[in-house]
Image (spheres, helix red, strand yellow):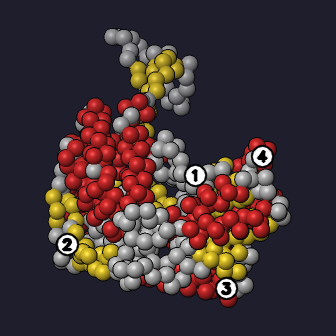
Amino acid sequence: MKTIQHWINGSPVPGALTAAVFNPATGAEQARVALGGAAEVDAAVTAAAHAFEAWSESSLSRRTQVMFAFRQLLVEHEEELGRIISAEHGKTVDDARGEIVRGREVVEYACGLGDVLKGSFSDQVSRGVDVHNFRQPLGVVAGITPFNFPAMVPLWMHPIAIATGNTFILKPSERDPSAADFVAELYRKAGLPDGVFNVVHGGKDAVDAILTHAGIQAVSFVGSTPIAKYVHEKATAAGKRVQALGGAKNHAVVLPDADLEFAADHITAGAYGSAGERCMAVSVAVAVGDAADGLVEVLERKAREVKVGPGDAPGVEMGPLVTKAAQERVENAVGTAAAQGATVVVDGRGLKIDGHEDGFFTGPSLLDHVTAEMDAYKEELFGPVLAIVRVDTLDEAIDLVNANPYGNGTALFTASGEAARRFQRKVRVGMIGVNVPVPVPMSYYSFGGWKDSLIGDSPIHGPEGIRFYTRPKVVTTRWPQPKQQVAAGFTFPTSN
């Protein structure tokens, strides 16, 4: 059976301990993955620290050449990488290719860092004195990434970190680890020097080693809110910079003036795409006033039309969940919702796919008459379950969104510009879509929520990513003429 190894200093490295990697569509073990700990992390840090000495001094032109080559390789190998992701995660190949494209956009942004990294210059701030500034890399940095986007989320981190002159250690999810090693091989083909990009697989032991290692200067994390809080606390206590993005409970508000077919079509895709295993998935539809009955009717029809099956099968729109435990958790949540008073309009439990009876499948579930007190509303289910909450007015919808502890993404479906403007100004959420259900920003904007969806104050990619992976220097310069007398003073210096 194939063993997925670490990638350290440009080569595969075996591990003594391994864990199973499953095919979610069949339920069968398909590979083993090495489980690293403190020793593997230390080896990766040693390699990365050595590589940093030369890579940080490489020219912007050299780094850009590598990024352009890497970007082209992502294009050429998109189908192959998409199938690797689908086989381990369960999402459809088309969905996997989509995440590669969104990750590649950050590589394209990194290709233009020569302009973004330009400093500024101020002439004659005092007599004969000039000031300029520039930014420099931190050193060895690390990323800890989730199972739901094994290519895209890491691509939101390492291209920016590497292009700005850092060296990088990736700790991907052990549930779908192969994409990380494939990307490491693409970097090698692109001409990236050994040790600049490293992969250490594993679980909590590897995470804790990263969070506490003195040689790592910064950590980027995407995952659940409890773990984001743990990562932020432990890594900042060790003196590191931290990006820690947590969970979500994303609302899509539908006003009576919205096109219900359009809204339901997009909400259905946003709720059930990738089996709901997205931090930007639509998990709550807020039906305002007279929109409610019509919206439920259309959502029910569209949920029943979703084609579920193996991710590599033609025409499939939704694959299995990533693990058996995830399948059981989601189906238990539907039962709990019914017991607490929700109406189960569409019940996805117990779905069996011919020829894949042991796969981790569950169908789309649609719950109506959900209230803010129910577990189906309060918990991040991370599965294909859409809860409908009914309110009377837009202001009630805004209050509902703002009362939720998460603030990752939200959407409004309406034909009213006034309502849209009021909504986007009043909701306390980091990313907002107007008639767009999954408002993931482009690479030249930053990705990050509010409240419990972002621990600390550092979003990911875009300009915020540049600032996170670099630190500024400000230089004040005087070049006096030969034998020129420049008076020195014991008082605090001022401009004159």
- Please say if the residues under marks 4 and 1 sit with CB atoms less than 8 Å apart: no
Name the image quarter holding residue 112: top left
Local SS, label 4: loop
Name the element at disc 3.
Answer: helix
Which residue was labeled with disc 3?
338
The residue identified by callout 2 is 3
Among numbered discs 3 and 1, the one appearing first in the sequence: 3
- Residue at 68% in and 89% down: 339
Question: In this rendering, which labeled residue sits more in front, label 2 or label 4?
Answer: 4
Amino acid type for the residue under numbered disc 1: Pro
What residue type is disc 2 on?
Thr
Camera-side residue of 272 and 1: 272
Q: Which of marks 3 and 4 is nearer the N terminus?
A: 3
Look at the picture and state if 184 lies above or below 327.
above
Which of marks 1 and 4 precedes in the sequence? 4
Residues 484 and 443: in front is 443
Q: Which amino acid does label 4 sit on?
A: Ser
**What numbered label is drawn on residue 439?**
1
In the rendered image, the quadrant that contains the N terminus is bottom left
Residue 403 in the image, given as x and y percentages of width and height: 72, 66
Crowding around mark 4 (Cα neighbors within 10 Å: few <14, some 14 to 19, many 20+) is few
Residue identified by numbered label 4: 416
In the displayed structure image, the side of residue 390 where residue 147 appears, left or right: left
